């Protein structure tokens, strides 16, 4: 009887969770959740399968610094489609519980993975928070951010959280992308363009992979911020001038902006760097055909 009651309660919780959490099917036909997500996570739900903490935080004594978080709220932006979210969100929840802190202090928000709403919430919950990677954990006291962890801990999870609590947070991962978003938000896009050469000089040794700014460019592109996307993609070509993929992204942005001539020009630059990219030639042929049709229609 006890097992029957437990199963019934679990089924009821799954139904309630599914009704209260927004879901969507992505371009791969996979079901995912977006928007505010209730706790605890129903790990028996197929979407949450495997979302268990790998690390065990069996703390013999509660650290003294844990108490400073009792008036702190944490926003957790995640993707149920994201491997890093699947790893770090459960571990964060397990550690938060082990520190004797309340789940009521946590706000989980799922973001889309599709190209049209890339890393956006259904009600644009991420606006103003400079989200370009998931998961992102933002620690706030009132309205003031006191620290964040971007995608993965810089040291290890407990050390990064302790440093935030002690007021000496480590600089989060992807410092250049974070700085660009802050600069655009605080000073505007013109200021970023003015400081472009100085940025390359100061950040050259800090940007280790083209994917850092490429991802940021697609975040802006998905938010229909075309000028920001083009500027970030261009900046990435200065950091990685011999990477065909950064030029491919730059060309794609021009294509979506409607500037066919520049899109074709930069797609041809991709082929100059990697002649085996047959899909790029197909994009060029399609753009030429569209441009021809438009010319004949005028």
Image: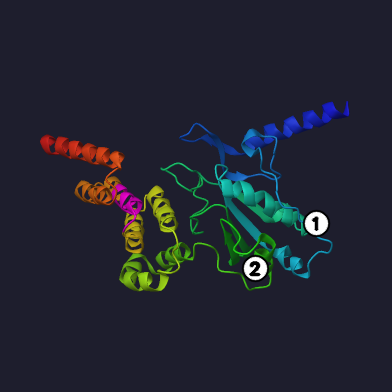
> Which residue is the site of mark 1?
58
Check if mark 2's residue and mark 1's residue have beta carbons within 8 Å.
Answer: no
Image x and y of residue 35, in percent: 56, 45
Q: Is residue 244 magenta?
A: yes
Local crowd size for mark 1, using a 10 Å CA cut-off: few (<14), some (14–19), many (≥20): few
Residue depicted at 71% across the width and 64% down the height: 71
Residue topped by disc 2: 164
Residue 97 in magenta stretch: no
Q: Which residues are magenta?
A: 242-252
On the image, the x and y values in percent for residue 243 come to: 34, 55
Given residues 73 and 49, the one toward you in this image is: 49
Residue 279 occupies quadrant: top left
Q: Quadrant of residue 4?
A: top right
Q: Which mark is residue 67?
A: none
Q: Quadrant of the N terminus?
A: top right
Query: In this rendering, would 128 be left or right of 157?
Result: left
């Amino acid at each position: 009887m006890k097992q029957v009651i437990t199963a019934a309660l679990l089924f009821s919780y799954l139904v309630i969770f599914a009704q209260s959490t927004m879901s969507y099917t992505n371009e791969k036909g996979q079901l995912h959740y977006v928007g505010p997500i209730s706790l605890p996570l129903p790990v028996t739900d197929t979407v949450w399968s495997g979302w268990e903490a790998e690390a065990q935080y069996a703390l013999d004594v509660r650290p003294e610094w844990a108490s400073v978080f009792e008036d702190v709220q944490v926003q957790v932006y995640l993707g149920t489609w994201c491997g890093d979210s699947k790893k770090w969100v459960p571990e964060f929840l397990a550690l938060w519980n082990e520190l004797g802190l309340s789940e009521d202090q946590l706000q989980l928000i799922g973001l889309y993975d599709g190209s049209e709403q890339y890393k956006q919430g259904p009600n644009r919950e991420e606006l103003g928070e400079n989200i370009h990677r998931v998961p992102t954990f933002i620690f706030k006291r009132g309205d003031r951010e006191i620290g964040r962890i971007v995608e993965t801990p810089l040291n290890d999870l407990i050390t990064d959280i302790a440093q935030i609590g002690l007021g000496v947070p480590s600089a989060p991962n992807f410092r250049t992308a974070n700085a660009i978003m802050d600069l655009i938000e605080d000073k505007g896009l013109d200021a970023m363009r003015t400081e472009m050469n100085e940025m390359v000089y100061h950040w050259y040794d800090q940007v280790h992979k083209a994917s850092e700014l490429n991802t940021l460019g697609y975040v802006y592109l998905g938010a229909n911020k075309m000028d920001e996307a083009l500027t970030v993609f261009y900046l990435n070509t200065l950091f990685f001038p011999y990477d065909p993929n950064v030029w491919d992204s730059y060309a794609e942005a021009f294509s979506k902006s409607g500037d066919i001539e520049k899109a074709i020009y930069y797609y041809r630059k991709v082929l100059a760097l990697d002649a085996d990219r047959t899909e790029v030639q197909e994009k060029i042929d399609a753009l030429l055909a569209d441009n021809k049709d438009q010319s004949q229609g005028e």
